[in-house]
């Protein structure tokens, strides 16, 4: 593969200068027609791994997506970037579907998104066989596995792809799959020697916090007050809870709506659309909400109840901060949640009840743990993460730790001597030297570590073993009836003298008190992003409302934050902002640069040394606009913008050396007839190109100074 082609596509269509870790390697594998299984966290850049190959390979990439709203959202985002994309699903009538199928057959699409039902239908297969398919991308691939947390029977039909199209590469992608699920995905899809790419699951921008489940509503209200003008999701276990909480939040002065499967399809679509467009900032929802959206500016996620497993939890909190900007997550926990979920699981007729209960146990351990939250999550997904993160409630308010190396060695040695064939309960009995008859019958009383932990209570042993699991020193093999397995980290403790820190269970209540104090200390000022960011955010929302699209499809929060920091005022400077591709620069560059210039003008056009002041001082020294542009490696129009902003802010300048009074008067008369917000190119076209951009920019600056051209 010619990697520069892929890099050019990345910049042109998506506005990024470089690939994230592993993306280039994955794209290369797909380009070379190798089957791949990709694990990346939500917001980690999975889509780029098949979207870029689709742009540089001949033919069309066929993407399997589980939800109509998800594929529609992604196609809308691609089209906003100038990519030729379409979807096929049941929301379209036959005429619309025929149009898309014709585009697909004629090779007019880069990407085609389809549902698994559509792809597997008998009437679609002939079209697939006749069209030029570059690759198949199976999104949310964990849905194919009965071991996964979101199994969908229709996904199992996708094994026909490798049978019918053995030479076409398949890329399967998921954000949450443990070792068993990964193996099952490969087998179910019949991937040929699939290359496994496991990106770090670390989402360092997510702040992780767990709180007691008491007085949840009051805590949520206080939390939202600390996050003004930010959108988020509250996940609840029941439909009734979503409705009641939404009503309570509205009564408290917020704007919130509920969302659950019991609502009719039209109402659900309206609520989701309003949330995507930032018209409703808060959604109280069951887990049915969120998988089908690609909204990048969700700034927080709250779990009103404990999720069923860590896979669900990690996927749901992953809906916050998809733009890589800071985001907060809050999980409420009570033992009543555990009992309720246990009852739901045991009444379910699933074949994997034991596995589901075991995973619920791991979720409970996470909530009760006194170890770094991120270490627990990453080690659960078999990522050897040794350091504490510094961005969770435990790291911010660390409990009292002690040297638990000897305890860890006893436990790990017992697992080793028991040949990794026992579960938690039996291991505790061995360590405490239980007199159980079956232990003696199996010969477990003969191992060296039998009874080595008599002085530790069963309660404390269970707690310590839970910490060792969460810290990655032990792993639970769910596919082997929950027996404990050693890990690379545990072998370092046994054979390389690595030390282990554990926490005494008695410190749990103490930590809760510290958390409560820390929560009160968090202030609104800590979360301020500045006036310019807020101005750009409001401008983005205004443009989105005019176009009828979600605001994040214009620019993400992360892109706006970078704009607010860098303050670009030229095309060249704007291109350097991550997330600004050529299409978006063409559509929105002028209006956002104008807002930045207006902001700088209102602030007295920056302090001495700012980019505007430098151009102004060089002009006063006798340099021409062209000379200033050459010296500073910027466009002449940017120099005019700098000079105009200084002039509008009150700095002395003879405006008439750039533009005549006649042209200024004509511009003033033209403004009411042009679309708002006013674009310089529109004004240029209004004058049939007979007045230069520089003269028009200076005319607008004069009118702004005179109060005749209001700042947007």
Image (spheres, rainbow, N blue to C red):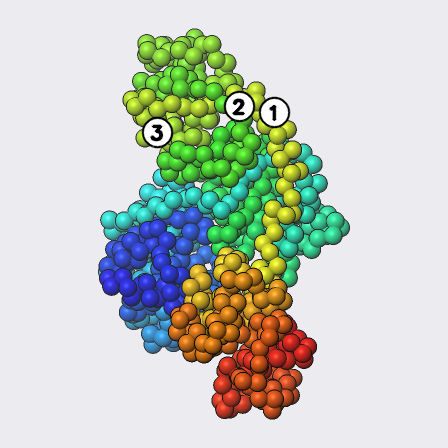
Q: Considering depth in this image, is 472 or 147 the residue closer to the camera?
A: 472
Q: Position of residue 662 (x, y in %)?
A: 60, 91
> In the rendered image, which quarter is residue 32 located in?
bottom left
Q: Considering depth in this image, is 379 or 16 the residue closer to the camera?
A: 16
Q: Earlier in the sequence, mark 1 or mark 3?
A: 3
Q: Furthest residue to the front?
A: 621
Are circles 3 and 2 on residues that touch, CB within 8 Å? Answer: no
> In the rendered image, which quarter is residue 355 located in?
top left
Residue 655 lies, with reference to residue 203, above or below; the image says below
Instruction: Pick the quarter of the image with the C terminus.
Output: bottom right
Residue 345 lies, with reference to residue 438, above or below; the image says below
Is disc 2 placed on a helix, strand or loop? Answer: loop
The residue identified by callout 2 is 400
The residue identified by callout 3 is 489
- Check residue 96 in the rendering and tell me which mark sits there, or answer none: none
Q: Earlier in the sequence, mark 2 or mark 1?
A: 2
Q: Residues within 10 Å of mark 2 (few under 14, many from 20)?
A: some
Q: Considering depth in this image, is 517 or 446 the residue closer to the camera?
A: 517
The residue identified by callout 1 is 510
Residue 653 lies, with reference to residue 397, above or below; the image says below
Give the residue displayed 35% in from the left and 66% down from the top.
Answer: 9
């Amino acid at each position: 593969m010619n990697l520069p082609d892929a890099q050019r596509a990345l910049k042109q269509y998506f506005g990024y200068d470089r690939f994230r870790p592993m993306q280039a390697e994955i794209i290369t594998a797909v380009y070379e027609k190798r089957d791949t299984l990709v694990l990346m966290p939500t917001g980690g850049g999975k889509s780029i791994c098949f979207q870029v190959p689709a742009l540089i390979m001949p033919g069309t990439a066929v993407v399997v997506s589980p939800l109509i709203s998800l594929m529609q959202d992604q196609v809308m985002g691609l089209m906003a970037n100038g990519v030729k994309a379409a979807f096929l699903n049941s929301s379209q009538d036959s005429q619309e579907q025929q149009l898309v199928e014709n585009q697909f057959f004629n090779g007019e699409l880069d990407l085609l998104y389809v549902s698994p039902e559509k792809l597997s239908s008998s009437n679609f297969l002939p079209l697939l066989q006749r069209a030029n398919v570059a690759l198949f991308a199976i999104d949310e691939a964990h849905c194919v596995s009965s071991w996964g947390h979101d199994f969908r029977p229709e996904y199992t039909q996708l094994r026909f792809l490798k049978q019918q199209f053995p030479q076409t590469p398949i890329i399967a992608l998921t954000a949450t799959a443990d070792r068993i699920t990964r193996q099952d995905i490969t087998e179910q899809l019949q991937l040929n020697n699939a290359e496994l790419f496991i990106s770090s699951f670390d989402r360092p921008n997510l702040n992780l916090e767990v709180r007691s489940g008491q007085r949840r509503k009051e805590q949520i209200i206080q939390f939202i007050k600390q996050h003004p003008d930010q959108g988020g999701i509250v996940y609840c276990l029941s439909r009734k809870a979503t409705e009641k909480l939404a009503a309570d939040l509205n009564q408290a002065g917020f704007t919130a709506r509920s969302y659950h499967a019991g609502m009719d399809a039209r109402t659900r679509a309206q609520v989701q659309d309003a949330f995507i467009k930032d018209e409703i900032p808060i959604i109280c929802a069951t887990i049915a909400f969120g998988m089908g959206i690609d909204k990048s500016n969700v700034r927080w996620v709250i779990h009103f109840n404990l999720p069923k497993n860590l896979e669900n939890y990690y996927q749901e909190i992953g809906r916050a901060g998809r733009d890589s900007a800071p985001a907060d997550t809050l999980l409420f926990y009570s033992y009543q949640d555990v009992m309720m979920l246990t009852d739901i699981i045991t009444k379910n007729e699933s074949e994997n009840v034991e596995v589901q209960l075991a995973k619920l146990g791991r979720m409970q351990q996470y909530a009760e743990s006194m170890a770094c939250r991120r270490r627990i999550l990453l080690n659960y997904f078999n990522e050897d993460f040794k350091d504490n993160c510094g961005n969770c409630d435990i790291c911010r308010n660390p409990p009292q730790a002690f040297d638990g190396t000897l305890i860890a060695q006893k436990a790990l040695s017992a697992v080793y001597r028991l040949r990794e064939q026992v579960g938690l309960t039996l291991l505790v009995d061995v360590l405490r030297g239980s007199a159980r008859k079956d232990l003696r019958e199996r010969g477990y009383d003969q191992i060296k570590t039998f009874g080595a932990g008599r002085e530790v209570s069963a309660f404390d042993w269970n707690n310590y073993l839970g910490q060792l699991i969460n810290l990655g020193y032990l792993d639970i093999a769910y596919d082997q009836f929950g027996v404990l397995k050693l890990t690379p980290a545990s072998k370092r403790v046994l054979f390389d003298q690595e030390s282990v820190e554990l926490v005494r269970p008695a410190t749990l209540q103490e930590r809760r008190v510290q958390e409560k104090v820390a929560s009160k200390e968090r202030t609104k000022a800590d979360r301020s992003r500045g006036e310019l960011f807020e101005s750009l955010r409001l401008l983005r929302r205004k443009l989105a409302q005019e176009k009828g699209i979600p605001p994040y499809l214009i620019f993400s929060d992360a892109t706006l934050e970078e704009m607010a920091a860098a303050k670009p005022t030229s095309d060249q400077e704007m291109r350097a902002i991550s997330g600004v591709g050529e299409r978006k620069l063409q559509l929105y560059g002028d209006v956002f640069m104008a807002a930045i210039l207006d902001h700088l003008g209102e602030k007295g056009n920056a302090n001495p040394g700012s980019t505007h002041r430098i151009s102004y001082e060089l002009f006063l020294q006798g340099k021409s606009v062209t000379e200033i542009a050459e010296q500073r490696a910027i466009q002449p129009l940017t120099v005019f913008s700098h000079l105009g902003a200084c002039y509008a802010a009150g700095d002395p300048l003879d405006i008439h050396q750039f533009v005549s009074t006649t042209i200024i008067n004509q511009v003033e008369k033209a403004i009411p007839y042009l679309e708002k917000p006013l674009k310089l190119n529109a004004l240029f076209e209004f004058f049939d190109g007979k007045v230069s951009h520089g003269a028009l920019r200076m005319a607008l600056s004069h009118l702004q100074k005179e109060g005749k051209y209001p700042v947007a």
